[in-house]
Image: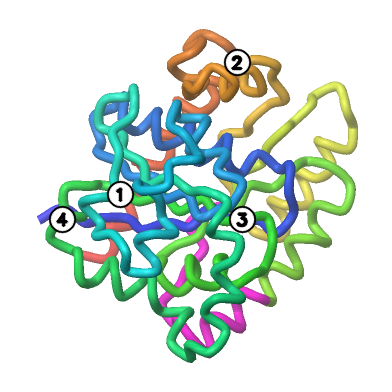
């Protein structure tokens, strides 16, 4: 029986390549024959539109799933990429925190849905949750529901300071809500080899997080920025560009690390 990975992609800082990573890592894994589901838990809905689906869909969205208006099978959508599905987001999600203020169980809602629907979800090798760029209820929901975290780290000033705050939040979640939560990997993004600061952040991150930092580095790349406006992952939009090649390399590394981890646990 295959072991599914349930991964939250998280950084409380915006503009670090979080959604770009969710879309292109999942699409790259799909190209390599893995079945993947993206759950867009960000009210901005950028992962949804970046996969060519509408973030104004009033029926098929994660909000309706979380408020129990729709079932899981009713909100999953196909994408233009074989083996890649998405549960889209819309702006209604931004009101969930206020609407559920009196629900003491609200942090566990997504986890409970995943557990109840494990048969339907069993076809996926990986489930990626795109978290909002904040430490809000939605992010806590994702951290409680997930087994592992992938953290994109922008190779710029203050990046490591921001991640220190995130590590503290993760530790609190582990103590209080999800003791089995692990950091799967740190991904260096927006790397500019002409910039000494990028190289410095790379070195400091590897000194601090050791083998948790992926060998693959995602460069600054115009094509990665262009692809979402076409509703396609960059690895489909322009598979030969440097950004796409980097995400395909990351997918290979992701699979190898996963395999070695399962073997060592066996």
Residue identified by numbered label 3: 132
Please, is residue 209 above or below residue 173 in the view? above
Cα gap from disc 1 to disc 3, whole angstroms: 19 Å
User: In terms of depth relative to the viewer, which is nearer, 140 or 6?
Assistant: 140
Q: Secondary structure at mark 4?
A: helix
Secondary structure of the residue carrying tag 3 is loop
Q: Is residue 116 visible?
A: yes
Q: Is residue 60 left or right of residue 83?
A: right
Q: Quadrant of the N terminus?
A: bottom left
Compare marks 1 and 3 and give the one earlier in the sequence.
1
N-term-proximal mark, 4 vs 2: 4
Discs 2, 3 touching: Cβ within 8 Å? no
- Position in image of residue 175 (x %, y %): 53, 88
Q: Earlier in the sequence, mark 2 or mark 1?
A: 1
Mark 4 sits on what residue?
120
- Report the mark closest to the observer, 2 or 1: 1
Q: CA distance from mark 1 to mark 4?
A: 12 Å
């Amino acid at each position: 029986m295959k072991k599914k990975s349930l991964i939250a992609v998280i950084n409380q800082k915006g503009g670090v390549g979080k959604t770009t990573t969710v879309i292109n890592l999942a699409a790259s894994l799909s190209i390599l024959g893995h079945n993947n589901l993206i759950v867009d838990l960000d009210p901005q809905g950028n992962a949804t539109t970046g996969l060519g689906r509408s973030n104004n869909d009033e029926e098929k969205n994660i909000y309706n799933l979380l408020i129990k208006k729709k079932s899981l099978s009713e909100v999953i959508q196909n994408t233009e990429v074989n083996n890649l599905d998405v549960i889209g987001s819309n702006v209604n999600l931004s009101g969930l925190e206020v609407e559920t203020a009196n629900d003491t169980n609200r942090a566990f809602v997504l986890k409970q849905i995943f557990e109840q629907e494990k048969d339907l979800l069993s076809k996926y090798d990986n489930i990626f949750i795109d978290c909002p760029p904040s430490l809000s209820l939605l992010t806590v929901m994702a951290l409680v529901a997930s087994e592992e975290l992938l953290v994109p780290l922008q190779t710029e000033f203050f990046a490591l300071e921001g991640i220190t705050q995130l590590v503290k939040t993760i530790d609190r979640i582990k103590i209080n809500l999800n003791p089995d939560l692990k950091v799967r990997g740190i991904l260096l993004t927006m790397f500019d080899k002409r910039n000494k600061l990028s190289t410095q952040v790379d070195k400091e991150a590897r000194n601090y997080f050791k083998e948790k930092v992926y060998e693959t580095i995602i460069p600054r790349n115009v094509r990665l920025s262009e692809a979402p406006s076409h509703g396609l992952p960059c690895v489909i939009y322009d598979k030969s560009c440097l950004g796409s090649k980097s995400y395909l390399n990351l997918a290979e590394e992701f699979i190898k690390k996963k395999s070695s981890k399962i073997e060592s646990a066996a």
